[in-house]
Image (cartoon, rainbow, N blue to C red):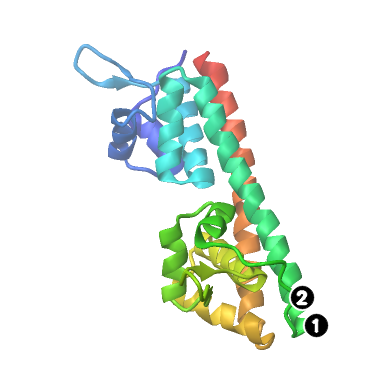
């Protein structure tokens, strides 16, 4: 197998040679053999590992991309696949939530009156529905995104269908990187069913991000499969 230098791997991705060495140190690349004088010897396997790692970073971020590569090198393939499945499941949830928000916005624009509520929910039930903590829901309330009523008998927060719609939107836009203050403004626009241009822009931006992430996941799967073929 043809040997490569750190500079050869770095040049393909416009990286520094130190970055390549750091990736090996951190377990993202398999350990390199050394010459008698101590120089690293890389191969096509290392080049494929670097392509896979960088593609995974593009799809899942630095932390999860690194975790996947380290898990590969520990021989825990089932755990790798489980991690990737979780990422795909979250992407699907985001896409479904985005579609639901679009439908809600269209309804609110055409019919300003809110739909009837099927009944209130507690903060714990709402948090479980969204997959967040009750503390996160309280933070959204403090930011003005949610305005739950209180049960007059217990004083506990109760969340209606409209509150849950606003919470789903907050969850979606937070994942898109939007600050709480921006989300609060968007939610107020939905509540009044007017001035939705900024909301439409936000949803279009998140759709572009979802599409880009989906394509990145496909590229990452291809690069990881190529690497596993060499590593096996």
Q: Position of residue 205 (x, y in %)?
A: 61, 67
Instruction: Give the camera-side residue of 123 and 177.
Output: 123
Task: Classify 10 Å Cα crowding around label 2: few (below 14), some (14-19), many (20 and above).
Answer: some
Tag of residue 106: 2
Q: Is residue 113 above or below residue 76?
A: below
Query: Can the viewer see residue 94 in this picture?
Result: yes
- Residue most toward the front? 153
Question: What residue lies at 56% left-to-right and 59% top-to-bottom?
Answer: 126
Task: Classify 10 Å Cα crowding around label 1: few (below 14), some (14-19), many (20 and above).
Answer: few
| Residue at which label 1 appears | 110
| Left or right: 215 in relation to 44 | right
Q: CA distance from mark 1 to mark 2?
A: 6 Å
Tag 2 secondary structure: helix
Determine the image quadrant of residue 229: top right
Q: Position of residue 181 (x, y in %)?
A: 45, 77
| Left or right: 63 in relation to 232 | left
| Left or right: 12 in relation to 27 | right
Q: Is residue 57 above or below residue 204?
A: above
Tag of residue 227: none
Determine the image quadrant of residue 220: top right
Instruction: Give the camera-side residue of 154 and 219.
Output: 154
Query: Can the viewer see residue 220 in this picture?
Result: no
Q: Is residue 101 above or below residue 62?
A: below
| Left or right: 20 in relation to 149 | left
Please say if the residues under marks 1 and 2 sit with CB atoms less than 8 Å apart.
yes
Q: Position of residue 77 (x, y in %)?
A: 52, 21
Question: What residue lies at 43% left-to-right and 76% top-to-bottom?
Answer: 143
Tag 1 secondary structure: helix
Question: What residue lies at 50% left-to-right and 16% top-to-bottom?
Answer: 231
């Amino acid at each position: 197998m043809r040997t490569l230098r750190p500079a050869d791997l770095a040049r393909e991705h416009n990286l520094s040679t130190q970055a390549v060495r750091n990736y090996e140190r951190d377990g993202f690349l398999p350990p390199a053999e050394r010459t008698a004088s101590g120089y690293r010897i890389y191969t096509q396997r290392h080049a494929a590992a670097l392509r896979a790692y960088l593609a995974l970073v593009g799809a899942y971020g630095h932390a999860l991309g690194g975790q996947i590569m380290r898990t590969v090198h520990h021989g825990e393939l089932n755990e790798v696949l489980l991690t990737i499945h979780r990422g795909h499941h979250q992407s699907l949830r985001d896409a479904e939530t985005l579609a639901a928000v679009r439908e809600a916005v269209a309804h609110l624009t055409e019919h300003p009156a809110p739909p009837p509520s099927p009944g209130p929910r507690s903060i714990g039930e709402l948090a479980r529905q969204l997959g967040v903590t009750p503390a996160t829901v309280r933070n959204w309330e403090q930011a003005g995104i949610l305005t739950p009523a209180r049960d007059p008998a217990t004083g506990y927060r109760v969340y209606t269908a409209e509150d849950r719609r606003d919470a789903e939107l907050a969850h979606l836009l937070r994942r898109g990187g939007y600050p709480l203050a921006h989300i609060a403004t968007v939610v107020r626009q939905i509540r009044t069913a007017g001035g939705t241009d900024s909301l439409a822009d936000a949803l279009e931006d998140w759709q572009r991000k979802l599409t880009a992430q989906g394509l990145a996941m496909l590229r990452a799967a291809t690069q990881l499969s190529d690497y596993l073929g060499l590593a096996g």
